Amino acid sequence: MEDKVAGVMVYYYFICKRKLWYFCHQITMEESNENVQMGKLLDENSYARDDKHINIDDVINIDFIREKRELHEVKKVRQ
């Protein structure tokens, strides 16, 4: 079986190697986090008219793409 490096793995490598280790070992710790729950709610209810959750080769997951080849990622912003 060939191991693939996903985009999120590269991101975790640069921001937090411990988070990368958790990810690689399928350990999740944020499911009960209020911000994670809010992000899931935003994802479910935002941009309903767009094609969402585009997966490319099981490596990259894009929230949605619009015209002019713009990639979009939906995130909750702290206020």
Image (spheres, rainbow, N blue to C red):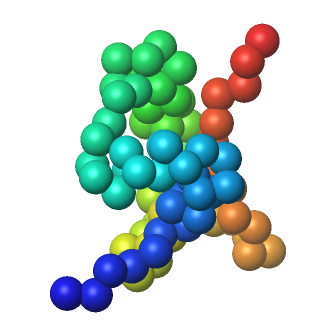
The residue lying toward the viewer, choosing from 39 and 66, is 39
Furthest toward the bottom, the residue is 2
The residue lying toward the viewer, choosing from 22 and 61, is 22
Q: In the shown orientation, is residue 40 left or right of residue 16?
A: left
Q: Does the image show residue 13? A: yes
User: Number of marks in the image?
Assistant: 0
Residue 16 drawn at (x, y percent): 60, 44
Residue 46 drawn at (x, y percent): 55, 37
Q: Residue at x 80, y 74 (%)?
A: 68
Q: Residue at x 53, y 20 (%)?
A: 35
Furthest toward the left, the residue is 1
| Picture layout, residue 49 above or below residue 30 | below
Q: Residue at x 78, y 12 (%)?
A: 79
Residue 31 drawn at (x, y percent): 34, 26
The residue lying toward the viewer, choosing from 77 and 1, is 1
Q: Does the image show residue 63? A: no
| Picture layout, residue 14 above or below residue 41 | below
| Picture layout, residue 56 above or below residue 2 | above
Instruction: Check the picture and name the quadrant holding the N terminus.
Output: bottom left
Residue 4 drawn at (x, y percent): 39, 79
